[in-house]
Amino acid sequence: AVCFPAAPIGMLIGHTAATAEGAESPLPLVFNALAAGTFLQMGAVEVLASEMMGGHGKCPGIVKYLFAMMGFATMAIIAKYA
C-alpha cells in the first residue's frame, strides 16, 4: 500500500527538481529511477509472482514464462532505442 503512491510522488519530485535546479542537476534522474524501480518491484514481486504460482485461467506455466520473457525483452529493446 505504501509503494503504490511512491512512483507518482517520485515523478512529481523529480519534475519539480528538474524545473527548480535546471537541466544540469542529477536529481530528476535519481527520482525517475526510483519511480521506475517501484514499478518494476510491483510488477516482478507482486503481480508476476502471483501469476506464476497459480494465477488466472488455464494457461500452462511455460507459456506464462515465455510471454513474461517476451515482455521483458520488448521493454529492454524499447529502453535501448528510446
Image: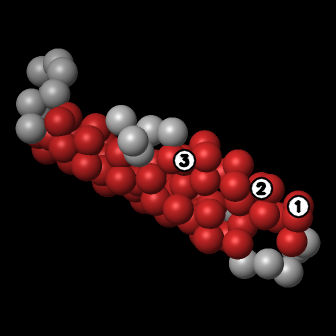
**31 to 35, vertically: above or below:** below
Is 20 left or right of 51, judged from the image as shown?
Answer: right
- For disc 2, the neighbor class at 10 Å (few under 14, some 14 to 19, many from 20) is some
* Among the 4 quarters of the image, the one containing residue 79: bottom right
Q: Residue at x 44, y 38 (%)?
A: 4
* Among the 4 quarters of the image, the one containing residue 26: bottom right
Scheme by which the image is coloured: secondary structure
**38 to 24, vertically: above or below:** above
Is 27 left or right of 48, judged from the image as shown?
Answer: right
- For disc 1, the neighbor class at 10 Å (few under 14, some 14 to 19, many from 20) is few
For the residues labelled 1 and 2, say whether their Cβ atoms are less than 8 Å apart.
Answer: yes
Give the number of the disc on residue 19. Answer: 1
Residue topped by disc 3: 7
Residue type at numbered disc 1: Thr
Is 42 left or right of 21, judged from the image as shown?
Answer: left
Give whichever of discs 1 and 3 has the lower sequence position: 3
Q: x and y percent of residue 46 in the render? A: 26, 41
Give the SS element for disc 2: helix
Residue topped by disc 2: 15
Residue type at numbered disc 3: Ala
Question: Is the N terminus in the top left, top right, bottom left or bottom right quadrant?
Answer: top left
Q: Does the rendering let one see residue 77?
A: no
Give whichever of discs 3 and 2 has the lower sequence position: 3
